[in-house]
Amino acid sequence: MLFFILISLVQSIDVRPNVNLTIGLDFMDNSHLSFFQQFQSYFLDFKQKGLNLIIAQHLLPCYSCYTRHQYKQPEQNCFGGGQYCQFSESVSGQTILTEMLRQQCILEEQPQFYFNYTIYFSQQCMQLPSEMKSCSENYFTNNNISTQSIDNCIQNSFEGPSEQFQSLKTNRILDQYKQLQYNKTKFALNLDDQDLTNTPFKQIMNQLCKKFEYASIPACGVIKADSIQKTNLLEQIFLILFAIIIILIIVQGSLQLLQNIQFKTFFTPKSRITIPKLEKDHIIQEDDV
């Protein structure tokens, strides 16, 4: 009884476990779309209970930039004078890096739009690299979303003297990506230290819900109910199979017993029967002879 009271008290408190969901992305790859599409409707529920979503973008290195000018000259495909770079044949690296900053700032400033926007961008804007910027702007215009906080976030992410060219400044968001050292060219997913990249979505949700066992999250309630239902079904199947096995054992035992009885009856010698002898009208018993 005390256990259930403690459970109720814990559930009544706003429990916020320290849970990190790290998503590794490569800008030119869209293998993340399936997970994003399935997870977007659950994200805010988990975030409100303490889920920390960490994005790790794949950056390209410029090994010669420091050798040539110690990151003190602008590079068309880089920020920070070559500290953070991207490359594409159809658009400049700085355009790609700016879009990375935009997506991160959406996550920080208006997280309710993050997954929907990144899905839109991957499906629509990546098909038109030369119109990437205008395609992005169309999303906010068509959905009547103010970008002021996002634009300010992008601008403030650059750090350095005000008189310094922006392309030469360091950037706190890109520094974070650089420190994460994500070097893969495909989507990756880690829940704390557990790699879930190739795990089916339902199992990912199960693992997430275990992390938030005492938090009230609607999606986890549905998953728990489904799990209980499946458990009950398995229990019913087990009981039915157990009953069938017991019946078969009883039937087999009965048949074996019947066979044994018939076998004994067949080989048991028959008892001698005294047959009376007849002599004329008088019945002579064997004892009279």
Image (tube, rainbow, N blue to C red):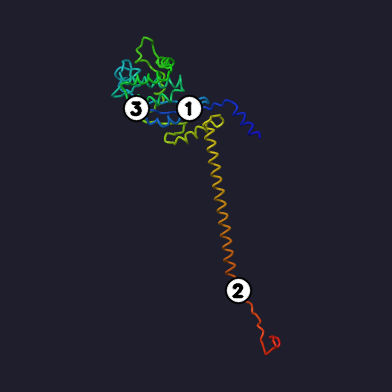
To which residue does mark 1 refer?
43
Q: Nearer the viewer, mark 2 or mark 3?
A: 2
Q: What whole-number distance in Å separates the C-alpha atoms at marks 1 and 2?
A: 82 Å
Q: At which x and y percent is residue 245?
A: 55, 54
Count of numbered tags = 3
Residue 28, label in figure: 3
Residue 139, label in figure: none
Give, as a three-letter code, the residue at label 3. Met
Q: Is residue 59 left or right of residue 44?
A: left
Q: At which x and y percent is residue 61?
A: 33, 24
Q: Name the one closer to the observer, 270 or 191.
A: 270
Quadrant placement of the N terminus: top right
Crowding at label 1, few (<14), some or many (≥20) Cα neighbours within 10 Å?
some
Q: At which x and y percent is residue 112?
A: 46, 23
Give, as a three-letter code, the residue at label 1. Phe
Residue 268, label in figure: 2
